[in-house]
Image (cartoon, grey):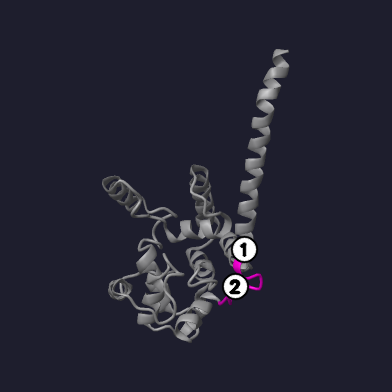
Amino acid sequence: MRAVLRWLFWYPLLVALIALVVLQFWFVVHIAYWGSHDPETTAFMRARLEAMREENPAARLSQTWVPYSRISANLKRAVVASEDAKFTTHRGFDWEAIEQARERNLREGEIVQGASTITQQLAKNLFLSGERAWWRKAQEAVITAMLETVLTKRRILEIYLNVIEWGDGIFGAEAAARYHFGVPAANLTPEQAARLAVIIPSPRRYGPGRVTPYLAQRTETILARMGSAQVP
């Protein structure tokens, strides 16, 4: 009887462990594939399309994949300067920024500052939902480590620039450059690139041509930092 009870206790745990291992293998296989093949979609893109089609069944996303060489160096520097200044030197996590964010959030009594690196943001966009839960953050950390191990920094940044949201249903640098400025991603000026970098945290808040005092001030800050930004 005791043997049966032990089996009933351990069997679900064993099944859950196997399922978890299989899931991690599924993640790493996809990441390895994307080392040489471009992702056709992401978890975040699918979620956005589903939400858009609740209001308009005919809604479509706008995205055109462009290789790294056809994305303006201005945009690469602007995004790194804005989102992850230590991108080329860390291994997926900026521990100093994480500690600074933790201290500030404790002082404020709420989450007012994040510290996600470009790689962490990509992990979330590629595979995860927007749900705020401890398991999702843990899985994000594991996927981040996988991305940094399997892919080069150049490839991580290339995928990131092609899949993040830059407007309502606007994904990737090419669609963003044409939507906001009417130019291809390769021709973005420093000012245009800085403006796109600034709106990454709230991409649906700023339509083409919209300028606010915050947007103008933050754009100037990013412009000043771009010269020292290191990109792969």
Looking at the rendered structure, the kind of residue marked 2 is Leu
Mark 1, residues whose alpha carbon is within 10 Å: few (<14), some, or many (≥20)?
A: some
Q: Residue furthest top?
A: 1
Q: Which residues are magenta?
A: 55-66
- For marks 1 and 2, the one nearer the N-term is 1
**Residue 225 appears in the rendering:** no
Looking at the rendered structure, the kind of residue marked 1 is Glu
Query: Which SS type dominates the magenta stretch?
Result: loop
Asked whether, in this view, residue 201 is left or right of residue 144, the answer is left
Q: Position of residue 28 (x, y in %)?
A: 61, 53
- Please identify the quarter of the rendering in which residue 206 is found: bottom left
Secondary structure of the residue carrying tag 1 is helix
Asked whether, in this view, residue 154 is left or right of residue 214, the answer is right
Task: Tell me the mark number nearer the camera, choosing from 1 and 2.
Answer: 1
Secondary structure of the residue carrying tag 2 is loop
**Residue 121 appears in the rendering:** yes
- Please identify the quarter of the rendering in which residue 58 is found: bottom right
List the residue tagged with mark 2: 61
Query: Distance between the Cα atoms at labels 1 and 2?
Result: 10 Å
